Image: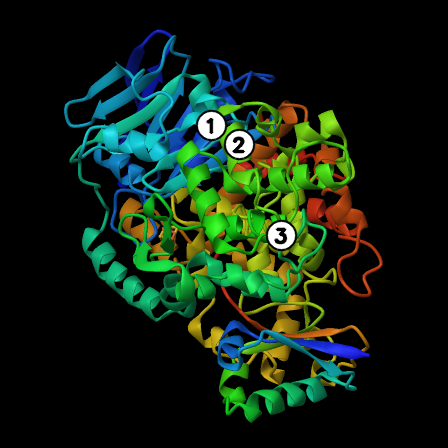
């Protein structure tokens, strides 16, 4: 077995209450690394077109990669892959916490759950004894994610769902510690299997090809992170909320159901403000991560709890025209405890508010007014009253009540917190990302408008190039599995220190903006490992990973996801953005919305797809994906 | 006839206000000068705070427009934006 892998997959069938260990396939590991990549391959091979996302035949796949189980910063993440009940296409989500570490220690690269139990159950795995138990979980059913985790056996690492997952809220997530695999409705799939929790334990050590080099190099990376303006300062000090002031200043902060990109009081939602007013002084992190981007806040009646991160601050704050952090803190806690994705939840609440305002739905919710929101969140989590409709997400609500023009979703997944009208590459990424309106499957906005080296976010240059490179890279990162924030460290300290109004900055950004195919070519070059994650992979597995290798693997995964979606009936028509984003300008002087129509053909070409968005035979042959 | 100037978090903390309106000035450079004056009156070291902030007009960095020479019109917002990370 290649080093870095435990070498086995655990398959559990809840219908028959049986399990088996099977060896990890080395060839698949070479081609897809692990995590999301390996999970996608398994899902594609094991499902038929049209499989019911909430039925017993949809596998729920938990997958780690070779970096998991090590002490590399940002490496305690696992991927969940399944068919999404929210979009009907590929579903996946990544989660921090400590479960990934637990899985590897238990000797599991992948855990595949199929079938459906006839009553609530939980799975307990003792990897050292090869013991797998399917236990009754009736006493846990109905409990929140926080309480559930306290009731599970100590010393194990857990992945659990809350009431939202049990009630198959289409954007329910899976929680590990205080972190959540939020997107795609993976928690609803777990709930549909009547599976409340998975607990893993073990003491297996991760075998590495060159442990000494890994250890020494990790020390260097920790130091690099400490001194990095993002990893060691911005994220560490303010959490992801640090970005609120940036997106607000750049007019891309979702406001009033994406009507605007700027809220005059958004500063009160920022990480800086949180530090001054709400933070109780404790920063939290996923296991072994020195970045500590989590924030604790105090809420009435609950004491110290996990605070909201950027997406929540935006979607449940400015997007609802709420700028009182106390409200957002409370709603964030409620959503976490119920086990729901706050992006989809916030977007759905914002949509309901606009429907209400327009007299299309009596939701008793209004922009700028916190009244009724807590109750509605509870109703959604328990599928009560109107909450049962809102539990199905924006797309289905728009099909029932109207308002498709301002229904903010892509492929059925609610769009995250960067308005693409001020970030064109991010718009292309949203439109084409296989799981739908999500930013962490590429994070193009960082290269374009929110990072230290921004290009003009509102012309067409590079906007069909950045998403290709970024999506490929993100596919690889999510397969190692590393935290996507690691990519923020790729821009060196010196660039952050440049005066953004200087001529030097202008020259560099102009050169970057015009780099197009050259950038893609440079990223695609196979050579020596340069970035820390390339080196870690190389030290651990003994294989060489450079930027070019990762681009190729990422491209393979991205195309396989595309093939899954096509098999489920998705076409180029699904590569689109909400009508509001395409047609309504937000910027002064903007004639229309996002120019997607001008960018998509170039994006398809860059991807090696035909004009209809279908991967060509040549592309599939090159990636080893031909049937 | 006014241009709105919006400050970064750090500037706001020092100044006590996040935004203020000024009469329309011809260019971004003039608006920056006004901001410098306003903050200077309160003894705030403007240079130090402005060095890490990009200047944007209606959300688009002036570096992607005509730099400090970018012309201003009634209703424009000049924002000092700090590059951040995460999300
Ligand atoms: S940067 Fe934040 S989200 Fe990423 S691994 Fe570290 S603590 Fe977790």
Q: Are marks 3 and 1 in contact (CB under 8 Å)?
A: no
Looking at the image, residue A301 lies above or below residue A7 = below
Badge 1 is on which residue? A164
Badge 2 is on which residue? A171
Q: Residue at x 26, y 42 (%)?
A: A69
Q: Would you say the beta carbon of the disc 2 residue lies within 8 angstroms of ligand 1?
A: no
Looking at the image, residue A219 lies above or below residue A305 = below
**Count of marks placed on residues:** 3
The picture quadrant where one finds residue A485 is bottom left
* First-in-chain label (2 vs 3): 2
Q: Secondary structure at mark 2?
A: loop
- A534 and A249: which is toward the camera: A249
Q: Nearer the viewer, mark 1 or mark 2?
A: 1
State the separation of the CA atoms marked 1 and 2. Answer: 8 Å
Kindly identify which numbered label has been placed on residue A321. Answer: 3
Which x, y percent locates residue A153?
20, 28
State the separation of the CA atoms marked 3 and 1. Answer: 25 Å
The picture quadrant where one finds residue A235 is bottom left
Q: Are marks 1 and 2 in contact (CB under 8 Å)?
A: yes
Q: Residue at x 79, y 73 (%)?
A: B75
Looking at the image, residue A577 lies above or below residue A171 = below
Q: Is residue A433 left or right of residue A302?
A: right
Which x, y percent locates residue A594?
75, 52
- A223 and A513: which is toward the camera: A223
Whether marks 2 and 3 lie on the same chain? yes
Whether marks 3 and 1 lie on the same chain? yes
* First-in-chain label (3 vs 1): 1
Q: Is residue A37 left or right of residue A11?
A: right
Report in which chain the residue with disc 2 lies: A
Whether marks 1 and 2 lie on the same chain? yes
């Amino acid at each position: 077995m290649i080093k870095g892998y435990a070498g086995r997959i655990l398959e559990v069938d809840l219908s028959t209450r049986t399990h088996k260990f099977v060896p990890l396939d080395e060839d698949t590991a070479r081609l897809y690394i692990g995590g999301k990549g390996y999970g996608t391959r398994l899902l594609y091979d094991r499902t038929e077109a049209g499989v019911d996302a909430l039925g017993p035949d949809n596998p729920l796949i938990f997958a780690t990669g070779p970096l998991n189980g090590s002490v590399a910063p940002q490496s305690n993440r696992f991927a969940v892959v399944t068919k999404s009940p929210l979009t009907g296409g590929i579903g996946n989500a990544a989660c921090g916490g400590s479960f990934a570490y637990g899985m590897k220690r238990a000797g599991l690269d992948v855990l595949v759950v199929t079938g459906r139990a006839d009553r609530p159950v939980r799975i307990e795995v003792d990897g050292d004894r090869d013991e797998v138990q399917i236990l009754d979980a009736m006493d846990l059913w109905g409990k929140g994610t926080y309480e559930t985790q306290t009731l599970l056996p100590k010393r194990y690492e857990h992945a659990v769902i809350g009431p939202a997952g049990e009630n198959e809220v289409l954007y329910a997530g899976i929680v590990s510690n205080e972190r959540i695999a939020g997107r795609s409705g993976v928690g609803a799939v777990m709930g549909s299997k009547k599976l409340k929790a998975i607990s893993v334990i073990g003491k297996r050590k991760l075998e590495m090809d060159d442990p000494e080099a890994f250890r020494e190099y990790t020390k260097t990376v920790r130091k690099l992170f400490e001194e990095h303006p993002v990893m060691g300062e911005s994220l560490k000090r303010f959490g992801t909320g640090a970005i609120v002031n940036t997106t607000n200043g750049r007019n891309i902060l979702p406001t009033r159901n994406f009507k605007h990109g700027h809220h005059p009081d958004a500063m009160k939602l920022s990480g800086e403000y949180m530090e001054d007013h709400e933070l109780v002084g404790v920063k939290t992190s996923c296991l072994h991560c020195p970045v500590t981007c989590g924030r604790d806040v105090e809420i009435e009646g609950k004491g110290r709890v996990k605070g909201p991160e950027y997406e929540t601050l935006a979607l449940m704050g400015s997007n609802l025209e709420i700028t009182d952090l106390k409200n957002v803190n409370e709603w964030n806690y409620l959503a976490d405890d119920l086990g729901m994705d706050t992006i989809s939840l916030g977007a759905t609440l914002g949509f309901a508010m606009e429907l209400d305002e327009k007299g299309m739905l009596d939701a008793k919710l209004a922009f700028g007014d916190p009244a009724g929101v807590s109750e509605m969140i509870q109703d959604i989590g328990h599928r009560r009253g109107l909450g049962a409709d809102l539990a199905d997400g924006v797309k289905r609500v728009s099909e029932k009540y109207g308002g498709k023009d301002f229904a903010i979703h892509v492929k059925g997944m609610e769009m995250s917190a960067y308005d693409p009208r001020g970030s064109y590459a991010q718009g292309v990424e949203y439109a084409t990302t296989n799981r739908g309106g999500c930013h962490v499957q590429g994070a193009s906005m960082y290269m374009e408008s929110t990072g230290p080296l921004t290009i003009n976010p509102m012309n067409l240059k590079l906007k069909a190039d950045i998403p290709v490179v970024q999506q490929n890279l993100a596919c690889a990162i999510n397969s190692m599995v590393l935290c996507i924030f690691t990519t923020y460290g790729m821009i060196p300290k010196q660039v952050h220190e440049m005066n953004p109004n200087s001529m030097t900055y202008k020259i560099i950004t102009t050169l970057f903006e015009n780099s197009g195919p050259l950038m893609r070519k440079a990223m695609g070059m196979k050579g020596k490992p340069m970035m820390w994650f390339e080196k870690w992979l190389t030290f651990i597995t003994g294989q060489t990973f450079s930027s070019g290798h990762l681009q190729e693997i990422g491209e393979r995964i991205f195309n396989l996801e595309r093939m899954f979606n096509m098999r489920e009936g998705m076409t180029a028509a699904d590569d689109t953005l909400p009508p509001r984003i395409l047609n309504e300008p937000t910027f002064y002087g903007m004639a229309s919305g996002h120019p997607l129509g001008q960018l998509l053909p170039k994006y398809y070409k860059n991807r090696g797809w035909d004009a209809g968005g279908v991967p060509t035979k040549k592309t599939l042959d090159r990636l080893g994906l031909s049937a | 006839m006014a241009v709105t100037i919006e400050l970064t978090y750090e500037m706001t903390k020092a100044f006590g206000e996040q935004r203020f309106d000024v009469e329309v000035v011809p260019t971004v450079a003039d608006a920056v000068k006004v901001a410098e004056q306003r903050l200077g009156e309160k003894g705030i070291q403007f240079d130090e705070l402005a060095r890490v902030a990009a200047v944007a007009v209606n959300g688009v960095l002036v570096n992607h427009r005509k730099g400090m020479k970018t012309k201003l019109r009634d209703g424009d917002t000049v924002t000092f934006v700090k590059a951040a990370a995460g999300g």
